[in-house]
Image (cartoon, helix red, strand yellow):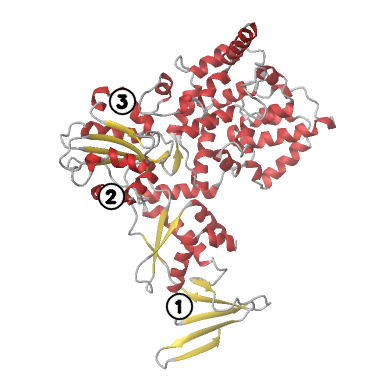
Amino acid sequence: MNRLKDKVNRSNDIQQIKRECLAYELSKLKESSKEAVESLKGFTGFKEYMHIDRAVQNELEEIILAASEQESSQLILVCGSVGDGKSHIISYFKTKYPEIMSKFTLHNDATESLEPNKTSMDTLNDLLESFTDEKIENSSQKLILAINLGTLNNFIDSDYGNRFTKLREFVNEKKILERSIIDNKFDANKNIQFVNFSDYSLYTLKDGKVESEYIKLLIKKITDKSEMNIFYKSYQNNCIKCINESRCPIKSNYELLSEDKSQDAIVDLLVQCIIKNKIIISTRALLNFIYDLLINRSYIDINDPMFKDKIGRLKNEEYINSLTPNIIFDHEELSFIFKSLHTLDPLNIRNEKIDDFIIKFNNSIEINKFFDEYIDYPKGYIDRFNNIDFEEKTHQKLKKELLKLFIRSYYMCGKGDLFNLNDQVYNDFMKYVYYWNKGEKPKLQNLYNEVKNGVLKWNGNADKNAINIFIGKNQIKYKVSEEIELKPDLTNLPYNNEKKLEKFLTTIEVKYKSDRLTESCEIDIDFPLYELLIRVGNGYRPNKKDRNHFIKFMESMNKIEEAGSQNSKLVFTEKNRQDNKKFRLEYDEEFEIYKFMEI
């Protein structure tokens, strides 16, 4: 009995130690935390504090309020992806409008089942009984259904879908399952309404630049100096008086995360991941990411009763590797977000200025002056290295780790004009995404020229307004080219007069027309393809992997090649000689003969 009592006391002591640490509150951000589980049944105080108004919320609110006043049946589809906040917002409305929401049946397809022995398709069939083709116009039921796009697609294509052809027609008419932006304001003449979370990104576009008020506000919920902020209260009550106050990376990282400059850098990096690597970041995954950004699990296990003691005994290299600028780029094993961020590591960027700085850093023994002059750290962030003599060879490994930390930190919170770590190709692409969605023709001229240049050089360099083609066996001595005329076709440009874009397409539909084409050729340009075409325009030759990766683009290339002069005129150019001769093969329609001549 005494042993059990001692065990309980030790457990209580450990829990008390954990509660007296910022890490305890931060653990609420983890995906494994009970706070991360969303349902339609309740809205906890923590979730209420973490709630952030979003444009999609305003859209859904208008639909719910309007639908609640209708006598006819109303099915509101709240569509999207896993973890994007559908249940969270519905729970928010349940708290905000209890009387109005009581008129609706609420169902989350991802987490709820009417009967355990039924499949999700069976459950949806039963749930939507009042919205079958026979009953939808005579029913008065009101239902809000949070449903993932994949599940919706599977349902309308299943055998049950034959009972819901009006639902299927609505989904197809509104292009809910397609990559498109459709107006979805409340329609009193319809029994079905919808909001698609996938139409909204975690970021917005303004004046050709990326912003994310949502991500930044989410970070500020964790760092704001507010009485309501449980994280900041824990920081004040526990971190400042902690025995590890001057050597705890969690405290240091929390202070760095509280800086505007660091927050902006994190926002920019996350949006780059979304655009460049096509990942989908849910709010749930985002909160878990912030937790991992602050606490390096490689060295710190907050479930260990001795974790505070171990923090105090972290070695210099372990402390450096536990700092946010290193965690964010160097831990691809943590999640798909970190795996994506690893591809953006500024250590992979090499240019003349960076190389010059590395030489200067390696030859210096006054390492701290570089950090003082060029890095905007919170007070005391790396003070533990102030008195280290870098003339000693024993500290060379530490110096190497500090160099990595410096370059990564310069990306996040650098100051001055030491070197440039920006991706200009990415910046240009986002500018074009903005202007294309707005339909601003004059500002898209360079885009159409750059894409055309990449297309014409895809098979190697050719003369102006010509493209190389492959005929028969692979030619070693000659390259064959055809004349081609591609003119921009701007008839498909969207139009949006809003200065700030909240709903937009991130894939640009570039079209070109030619006299030899019956219809314009369309090329869907996402960032990976845009970046590749820029490289091709600068001399890069696509390989087999590139061709296999961009299959849809290769189909467009085949169509473009058909628009050339290959049926009437070809040019043959010798390769790999000091003086490469050119020959032209053309068809004379008058005499119905071919002519072959040197140019």
Q: Nearer the viewer, residue 5 or 337?
A: 5
Instruction: Tell me if residue 576 comes above or below residue 393 in the rendering.
Output: below
Q: Position of residue 438 (x, y in %)?
A: 35, 48
> What residue do we see at 51% from left, 59% from top?
550
Q: Position of residue 220 (x, y in %)?
A: 48, 25
Inter-mark Cα distance, 1 to 2 = 45 Å
- Whether label 3 touches label 2, CB < 8 Å: no
Inter-mark Cα distance, 3 to 2 = 28 Å
- Closer to viewer: mark 3 or mark 2: 2
Q: Nearer the viewer, residue 143 or 429?
A: 143
Instruction: Tell me if residue 74 comes above or below residue 512 in the rendering.
Output: above
Is residue 114 shown left or right of residue 28?
Answer: left
Circle 1 is placed at which residue position?
A: 565
Q: Nearer the viewer, residue 361 or 331?
A: 331
> What residue do we see at 58% from left, 34% from top?
412
Circle 2 is placed at which residue position?
A: 168
Inter-mark Cα distance, 3 to 1 = 65 Å
> What residue do we see at 52% from left, 43% from top?
273
Residue type at mark 1 is Ser
Q: Position of residue 461 (x, y in %)?
A: 57, 69
Residue type at mark 3 is Lys
Residue type at mark 2 is Arg
Circle 3 is placed at which residue position?
A: 94
> Does residue 409 appear in this view?
no
* The quarter of the displayed image where residue 198 is located: top left
Instruction: Tell me if residue 235 comes above or below residue 449 in the rendering.
Output: above
Which dot marks residue 500?
none
Q: Nearer the viewer, residue 504 or 378?
A: 504
- Closer to viewer: mark 3 or mark 1: 3
- Closer to viewer: mark 1 or mark 2: 2
